[in-house]
Amino acid sequence: MKVIHYSEAETKVFDTEPAKGVTGRVVIGKADGAANFCMRVFELSPEGHTPKHSHAWEHEIFVHAGTGAVWRNEQWIEISQGNVIYIPGNEEHQLKNTGASPLTFVCLIPSGVAEL
Amino acid sequence: MKVIHYSEAETKVFDTEPAKGVTGRVVIGKADGAANFCMRVFELSPEGHTPKHSHAWEHEIFVHAGTGAVWRNEQWIEISQGNVIYIPGNEEHQLKNTGASPLTFVCLIPSGVAEL
């Protein structure tokens, strides 16, 4: 059993468009023996955003802290701590921070694709 | 795309030993078309706990709020918000609330087993 604080995991920073102000961490993945799905934690700085894109695999997201919005069907939906987002495969999506503190969310993906 | 607050999902209460003070919710599952893994959110009331048990499938857990402990190798490990726990299949585990407010955590399981 692995017990860490998410902030202990190695970071990967995405700060070149189409991403901005994104810090990602793989907190549970193949290196831990997790064969079925992978947990990542992302922190978006104020005004930060993920790319607007789509891909074949799904996302299961839980918003831990902060305020932001998710792009769904050509409009922004407000999100904050406690929100849950299910993004099916092949659906266009983007997340952005609309607040003054980091937007922190957990994002899980199935195995078989790049972990981060 | 589904966007909800976790508190909107239907609850299932476990308050008979070996569980106590546990409220569970399936927030992303088969009903949403999630074919690979399932997201649940659990709230443990003060002094609440999950069963001490093991099973073949893994857990990927993120602690959203509160303070508690997880049973690992015959001892309690303190946990609080931001902790990540990976419990491999067939490893004995239990979570308990040691604080005065709810212990809230996200717990994911692979598809193919009961969602809650």
Image: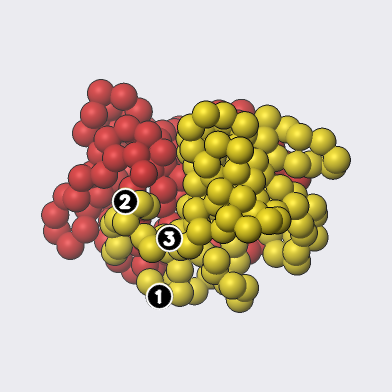
Chain colours: A yellow, B red
Residue B50's x, y, as percent?
32, 43
Establish whether labels 2 and 3 are both on one chain. yes
Residue B13's x, y, as percent?
45, 33
Residue at x-position 77% and y-position 59%: A54
Depth check, mark 2 against mark 3: the one in front is: 3
Residue A5's x, y, as percent?
31, 51
Q: Is residue A57 left or right of residue A15?
A: right
- Residue most toward the right? A74
Mark 1 or mark 3: whose residue is earlier in sequence: 3
Tag 2 residue: A5
Mark 3 neighbour class, 10 Å CA radius: few under 14, some 14 to 19, many 20 or more: some
Quadrant containing the N terminus of chain B is top right
- Label 1 vs label 3: CA separation? 15 Å
- Residue most toward the front? A16
A54 and B111: which is toward the camera: A54
Q: What is the chain identity of the residue bearing mark 3?
A: A
Q: Quadrant of residue B10?
A: top right
- Label 2 vs label 3: CA separation? 13 Å
Q: Where A99 falls versus A62 (above or below)?
A: above
A91 and B52: which is toward the camera: A91
Depth check, mark 1 against mark 3: the one in front is: 3
- Which of the numbered marks, if any, corresponds to residue A31? 1
Mark 1 or mark 2: whose residue is earlier in sequence: 2
Q: Is residue B9 visible?
A: no
Q: Say which amino acid is labelled 1.
A: Ala
Residue at x-position 45% and y-position 74%: A30
Q: Where B91 falls versus B2 (above or below)?
A: below
Q: What is the chain identity of the residue bearing mark 1?
A: A
Tag 3 residue: A11
Residue at x-position 34% and y-position 39%: B81
Q: Say which amino acid is labelled 3.
A: Thr
